[in-house]
Image: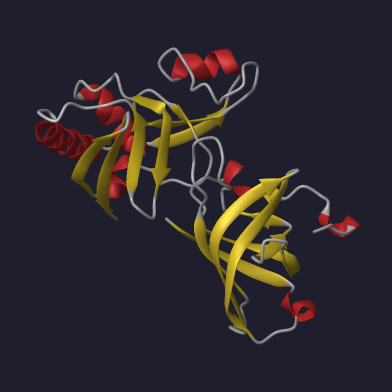
Amino acid sequence: MELTDKHRNPTKLEYYEDMWKLQSKATFLSSFTTDDGRIALILDSTIFHPQGGGQPCDTGVIAHSSGGFKFVVQDVRSKDKIVWHYGFFEKSDLSMDEVGEVLLLHSAGHLLDICIKNVGLGHLDPGKGYHFPDGPYVEYKGKVSQDDLQSKQSELEIEANALIAKGGKVSAAILPYDEASEVCGGCLPGYIPEGSTPRILKLGDNPGCPCGGTHVSDISEILCLKVSQIRTKKGLTKVFYNVGS
């Protein structure tokens, strides 16, 4: 799909300016069916973080204030600094020329990264981990012995809820590579290019981690976390969890 000139400007990434924003307004630019048969929407700005860098995409809804337009966002990708929102129309009573301004509604693991180290599972590599909010689970490179799975599941849950009870401000900043590495405990994941300026998320007084997207403003807003299962297979460990909010 070739974009027209008016669509070639980079999409404004609002989550870099306010990572706690779960709702925003944007100007609708176009809707079309891609070569693989999916429907895509392009806007002038977005609060939806695209998939990439070890992070899954955000999901949610794009709607018009009149109620005559509602698009469910299932996948988000960035191509040449333009964000593509993939999904389906739940309602489309307006012509594309009538849409104009739309409302973006965001539907809301890093806590587990901290707990993994605190309970003696530091050999698991969160730098290659993936956070799946729709699962939800976090996937790490590395194994946990079968004998330790049940005990570590309990320890992770206790540690996570202790951190939640303690609370702590969640903050983010774009930092030079060396400073970001120091904030993250001395190293950054391999997918972060050397010399870059990654956005680093900090949960309270704990070491930081690179991440975009939206987050709670304080750890205590999570309320509680339940680790439902840990699985180890083929050199990967998945930690399944549910959170309260």
91 to the left or right of 169: right
58 to the left or right of 9: left
205 to the left or right of 197: left
Q: With respect to residue 108, does 93 lie above or below?
A: below
* Residue depicted at 60% across the width and 41% down the height: 16
* Residue depicted at 28% across the width and 20% down the height: 122
Q: Work out whether residue 22 can be spotted.
A: no
* Residue depicted at 84% across the width and 57% down the height: 2
Q: Residue 182 location in percent, x, y? A: 47, 14
Q: With respect to residue 235, does 47 lie above or below?
A: below
Q: Residue 88 location in percent, x, y? A: 58, 72
List the single residue furthest toward the front: 234
Q: Residue 74 location in percent, x, y? A: 52, 61
Q: Which quadrant of the rendered structure holds the C terminus? A: bottom left
Q: How many labels sit on residues?
A: 0
* Residue depicted at 52% across the width and 45% down the height: 213
List the single residue furthest toward the right: 5
Query: As rendered, which of 76 and 6 lies closer to the eye?
Result: 76
Query: As rendered, which of 136 and 213 lies closer to the eye?
Result: 136
Q: With respect to residue 199, does 135 lie above or below?
A: below
**Which of the 4 image quadrants contains residue 99?**
bottom right
Q: Which quadrant of the rendered structure holds the N terminus? A: bottom right
Query: As rendered, which of 112 and 216 lies closer to the eye?
Result: 112
Query: As rendered, which of 144 and 215 lies closer to the eye?
Result: 144
37 to the left or right of 214: right
Q: Residue 143 location in percent, x, y? A: 26, 26
Chosen colour scheme = secondary structure
Q: Work out whether residue 135 can be spotted.
A: yes
